[in-house]
Amino acid sequence: MPSRTKKFRGYRTHGRGKKSGRGAGIIGGHGMAGYGKTGKIGMLKEDRNYFGRHGFKRPQCTVEANRTINVGELSEKIETFVSMGFASKEGDAYKLDLTEAGIDKLLGNGNIDFAVNVTVESVSGKAREKIEAAGGSIAE
């Protein structure tokens, strides 16, 4: 018995018509194609929430992200804060007001090797440890 391929040599579609010979034509697609039409019952049984939008997203005008700075960045940018007027040098220590600079939270990444007296809204535990270990203090 000759193979079907050999039998249909010279015939463009091999007896399948135009569309069904291409890709996943006759089965209606791959994956979840046609889920809302031919696969409607399956969709209703397995995943009722497949279509539509779900949940709630807060409006971006009401969401406020904390503006943060790390201890390492503070160490690098202390002279910039002095030149901008947010910090001043008092003896061996710097006095810095981060709330006035528009920064909400001090985080603990990096190192600092000089004393800084910082005023800030909130501070992480690691940042507090590092500032106090360097001889500084934090006022909230």
Image: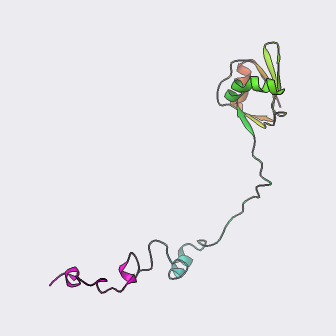
Residue 93 seen in the figure: yes
10 inside magenta stretch: yes
Q: Residue 100, percent across and down?
A: 85, 33
What residue lies at 68% left-to-right and 31% top-to-bottom?
A: 108
The outermost residue toward the top is: 91
Height in image: 81 above or below 39?
above
Whole-percent x, y for residue 42 in the image: 51, 78
In the rendered structure, the answer to whether residue 113 lies left or right of residue 86 reads left
Asked if residue 24 is among those painted magenta in the image, a careful observer would answer yes
Vertical comparison of 40 with 138: above or below: below
Q: What is the quadrant of the N terminus in the image?
A: bottom left
Q: Residue at x 79, y 20 (%)?
A: 94
125 left or right of 15 in image: right
Left or right: 48 in relation to 105: left
Q: Nearer the viewer, residue 83 or 122?
A: 83
Residue displayed at 80% across by 24% down:
83
Q: Is residue 116 left or right of residue 13?
A: right
Asked where in the image residue 125 lies, by quadrant, the reply is top right
Magenta-tinted stretch: 1-28
Q: Is residue 129 visible?
A: no
Whole-percent x, y for residue 114 in the image: 72, 17
Query: Residue 115 at what x, y percent from top left?
Result: 75, 18
Give the main secondary structure of the magenta stretch.
loop
Image quadrant for the C terminus? top right
> What residue sits 65% from the left and 24% below the top?
111
For the residue pair 64 and 139, the one nearer the viewer reads as 64
